[in-house]
Amino acid sequence: MKVSSVIVAAGKGTRMGAEKNKVFLNLIGKTILEHTVAVFQNAEIIDEVIVVTNDKEECQELLSGYDKVTNIVDGGATRQESVKKGLMCAKGDYVAIHDGARALIKEDEIVASVKAAEKFGAAAVGVKSKDTLKKIDKNGFIIKTVDREFVYNIQTPQVFKLDEIKKMHTLAADGSFTDDCALAESFGVRIKMVDGSYDNIKITTPDDLEIAEKILKNRSMI
């Protein structure tokens, strides 16, 4: 069985306030994207890595030393379109779709999600919500409290059978899906939730970058 990974790194860094794609920002000596790709490069369960970006030349230079990176693909106008472009280059039986800005993913979380997908057909990494959640009406008034025991904050990777998720992306009329689980859910796919880590943040703002630096420094001290 072969497992591909599609790393989506075609953002613009608007919320980061950067003049370039946030994945090219420095995070303790390497770019955010290099940290992300390195985890998939080192994971034995991953056979190939496809990176989707709007900065192809910079990525090619940056990732030239990662031999599992088989394709660097131009991104699309939306995340959904970018993922679809990456999927079209993948050759695995399964594919792990991951946000390029989630540089703190661990190898064991990748392995757990892939194995869960093998067993159940599809899987995604996430963490239980720490907060008390409320459902509101259209006027902003609380209707009820949601039982957080059954509520997760979704992360990536999200793992699917490659042929199935490619077909779903091809058939999806609505191009606004920002999450591949949501797309798969719209086709009735059951997705197994895999417990991840609260460290697996998406680095989106300057505060996130500071948090990521602290997490990596703590890891290096263990």
Image (spheres, grey):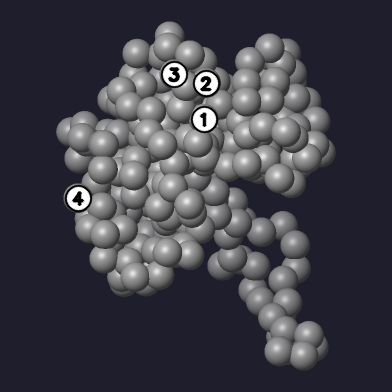
Q: CA distance from mark 3 to mark 1?
A: 9 Å
Marks 4, 1: nearer the viewer? 1
Closer to the chain start, of discs 3 and 1, is 1
Q: Is residue 221 visible?
A: yes
Q: What distance separates the C-alpha of mark 3 from that of mark 2? A: 6 Å
Residue 191 placed where, x, y %?
37, 59
Instruction: Identify residue type, mark 1.
Output: Asp
Give the farthest residue toward the top.
65
Front one among 123 and 29: 29
Amino acid type of the residue that numbered disc 2 sits on in the rendered structure: Glu
* Labels 4 and 2: the sequence-earlier one: 2
Q: Which residue is mark 4?
A: 163
Which of the 4 image quarters holds residue 90?
top left
Q: Are marks 1 and 2 in contact (CB under 8 Å)?
A: yes
Q: Residues within 10 Å of mark 2 (few under 14, many from 20)?
A: few
**Dot label at residue 58:** 2
Compared to residue 145, the image places residue 48 above or below, namely: above
Image quadrant for the N terminus?
top left
Query: Could you say which disc has been placed on residue 60 in the image?
Result: 3
Which residue corresponds to the image point at 24% horizontal and 46% vertical from the top-left?
162
Q: CA distance from mark 4 to mark 2?
A: 30 Å
Q: Give left or right: position of 88 versus 130.
A: left
Residue type, numbered disc 4 = Asp
